[in-house]
Structure formats: structure tokens, C-alpha cells
Image (cartoon, rainbow, N blue to C red):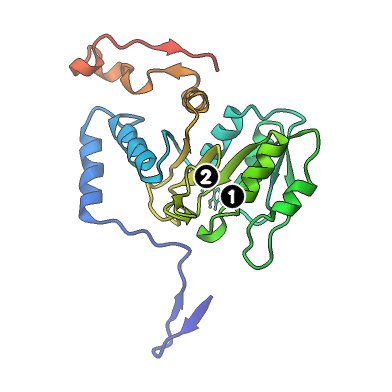
């Protein structure tokens, strides 16, 4: 969309415009000067901050909202023949994450007033192959979690929230991030806060959190403590004695 200004120049509404201040730049420079450029202590701090903010027990950071959806689909065991119900009004990553795991996305329509998934449509789409429901908190509006949770409980399904648009949103006094079994966030620059690219999954389930941590790091545990070939022998006491260990991915 554009409009003409008095001097004839066109101004476009930007797709997104991030807000980066001097403190942000200094924080990035600190990391660049440290030993840890990947999945180091700053990532753990960020996970803790998001977990506290939303009130969840666990938060697992990954490289994008898409990766967060994929990690969540892996964690709940979506595979060939499994159906996952989700709304068509979303970014394509929501459905693609089901396909990445070999599952089948099944669309349930949205309420035309809110553009949020309609719980009645969800219930109508459940089959013996349905394994999970993904609620998309479109444009920052939380879905009808009371109804969706009741449907999930009744049919023994996992409820996931794609809250990529909804960091900080609340539903009946509770922050988005604990309303579903797993909640996915994106930190792409068009979202509320940005890490450049980035994503996170919050959950209260320690087993799901462990599976996502294995998934994000090729099944290797103790990610933030492993040696870097460039810094061997250990550059800090924290690294001394660290060992690689393969998980059960
Ligand atoms: C609803 C929704 N889910 C998932 C994603 C994917 O997030 P990312 O761009 O960080 O991969 C987006 C991104 O726009 C989104 O809007």
C-alpha cells in the first residue's frame, strides 16, 4: 500500500521495522567477543526469561518459529499417517511442520469475526488418526482455549499453540505460553521482539522439553558445555571436564 506525499514521493507501509537500541548492539558485541557464538549461556538466559515471563516450566530456544513448530511436532511424535488439525488462516509453516514429520495437516475453518480456529469445526474434523490440534493465536488474539482444551481432553489429543503472533497476550488472566501442552513463539523481526531469526517452545512437560533439546542438537546432550576445537584446551573452568554424549534421537 502506498500514498502520495505533498512533494510527490511515495511512502510504503513497511513489512516490518525492528527497534534496535545501543544496549542491544552492545549485548551482541559482548557475545561476539566471548567464546560462545552458538547455543551458549545467553541462550539459556533468554530461555529462562521467556519461561518466567509466560509462566512455563520449560523453554527451548531454536533458530526460528518454523524450527520451533518442527521441534514440537517431533517431540509429540507426529509421523506417517498422523493427522493434525489446524486453521488455514496462518503462515504456511504451521502446516509445513506437520508435513516435515510425514503427517497430514487437516484444516478446520476459522470464525469469520476473529479469524481464530472454530472449536466446533475442530471437533467435526477429528478422526481415529487425529493426534493433535494446533491453535493459531492469529494477530495476537488468544484462541478459545477452554473449548479447545476440553475437546483435546475428551479425544485424548495434544493441544499445541502457534503463538508466533501472541507473545505477551493473555487469556482469562493467564499469559499465552501455558494454555496448551506446547506453545511456539517466533522472534523474526516482524514479531514483538526479535533475535534476527529465532524461535522458542514453552511447555510444562519435562519429557517434551528434553525431546526438543535433543532434536535441536542432533541428539547431542550438554550442548552449551561442549568443547570447541578452536578453544581446546578448555578456555574456562566451566568447560573443563565437558564431554560430548550422544542422546537417543
Ligand atoms: C503464525 C506463524 N507461525 C509460524 C511462523 C514462522 O516463524 P518464523 O518466521 O520465525 O519461522 C510465522 C511467521 O511469520 C507465523 O506468522
Quarter where residue 239 is shown? top left
Count how many numbered circles sit on residues in the image: 2
Quadrant including the C terminus: top right
Q: Relative to residue 169, is residue 208 depicted above or below?
A: above
Label 2 crowd (10 A; few <14 / some 14-19 / many >=20): many
Q: Nearer the viewer, residue 168 or 24?
A: 168
Q: Relative to residue 241, is residue 22 depicted above or below?
A: below
State the image coordinates of residue 60 (x, y, percent, origin top left). Answer: 44, 33
Q: Residue at x 39, y 12 (%)?
A: 244
Of helix, strand and loop, which one carries label 2? loop
Q: Residue at x 48, y 38 (%)?
A: 201
State the image coordinates of residue 124 (x, y, percent, origin top left). Answer: 79, 48
Quarter where residue 21 is shown? bottom left
* Residue labelled 2 has its Cβ within 8 Å of some atom of ligand 1: no
* The label number, if any, that marks residue 220 in the structure image: none
Q: Relative to residue 174, is residue 67 depicted above or below?
A: above
Quarter where residue 30 is shown? top left
**Which residue is denoted by mark 2 in the rendering?**
179
Residue 207 in view in this figure = yes
Label 1 crowd (10 A; few <14 / some 14-19 / many >=20): some
Q: What is the distance, in whole Å, between disc 2 and disc 1 at their CAs?
A: 7 Å
* Left-right relation of 115 to 53: right
Quadrant including the N terminus: bottom right
Q: Residue at x 19, y 15 (%)?
A: 237
**Which residue is denoted by mark 1 in the rendering?**
145
State the image coordinates of residue 93 (x, y, percent, origin top left). Answer: 60, 45
Specify which label sits upstream in the sequence, 2 or 1: 1
CB under 8 Å between discs 2 and 1: yes
State the image coordinates of residue 29 (x, y, percent, origin top left). Answer: 22, 42
Amino acid at each position: 500500500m502506498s500514498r502520495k506525499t505533498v512533494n510527490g514521493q511515495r511512502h510504503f507501509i513497511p513489512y516490518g521495522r525492528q527497534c534496535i537500541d545501543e544496549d542491544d548492539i552492545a549485548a551482541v558485541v559482548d557475545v561476539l567477543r566471548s567464546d560462545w557464538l552458538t547455543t551458549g549461556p545467553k541462550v539459556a538466559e533468554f530461555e529462562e526469561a521467556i519461561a518466567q515471563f509466560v509462566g512455563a516450566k520449560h523453554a527451548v530456544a531454536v533458530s526460528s518459529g518454523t524450527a520451533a513448530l518442527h521441534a514440537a511436532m517431533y517431540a509429540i511424535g507426529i509421523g506417517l499417517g498422523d493427522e493434525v488439525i489446524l486453521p488455514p488462516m496462518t503462515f504456511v509453516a504451521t502446516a509445513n511442520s506437520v508435513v516435515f514429520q510425514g503427517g497430514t495437516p487437516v484444516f478446520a475453518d476459522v470464525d469469520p469475526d476473529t479469524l481464530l480456529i472454530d472449536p466446533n469445526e475442530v471437533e467435526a474434523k477429528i478422526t481415529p488418526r487425529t493426534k493433535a490440534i494446533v491453535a493459531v493465536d492469529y494477530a495476537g488474539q488468544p484462541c478459545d482455549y477452554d473449548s479447545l482444551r476440553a475437546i483435546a481432553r475428551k479425544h485424548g489429543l495434544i493441544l499445541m499453540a502457534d503463538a508466533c503472533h501472541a507473545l505477551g497476550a493473555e487469556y482469562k488472566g493467564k499469559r499465552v505460553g501455558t494454555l496448551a501442552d506446547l506453545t511456539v513463539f517466533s522472534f523474526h523481526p516482524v514479531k514483538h521482539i526479535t533475535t534476527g531469526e529465532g524461535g522458542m517452545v514453552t511447555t510444562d512437560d519435562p519429557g517434551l522439553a528434553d525431546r526438543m533439546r535433543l532434536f535441536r542438537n542432533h541428539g547431542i546432550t550438554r550442548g552449551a558445555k561442549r568443547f570447541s576445537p578452536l578453544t581446546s584446551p578448555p578456555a574456562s573452568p566451566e568447560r573443563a571436564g565437558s564431554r560430548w554424549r550422544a542422546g537417543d534421537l
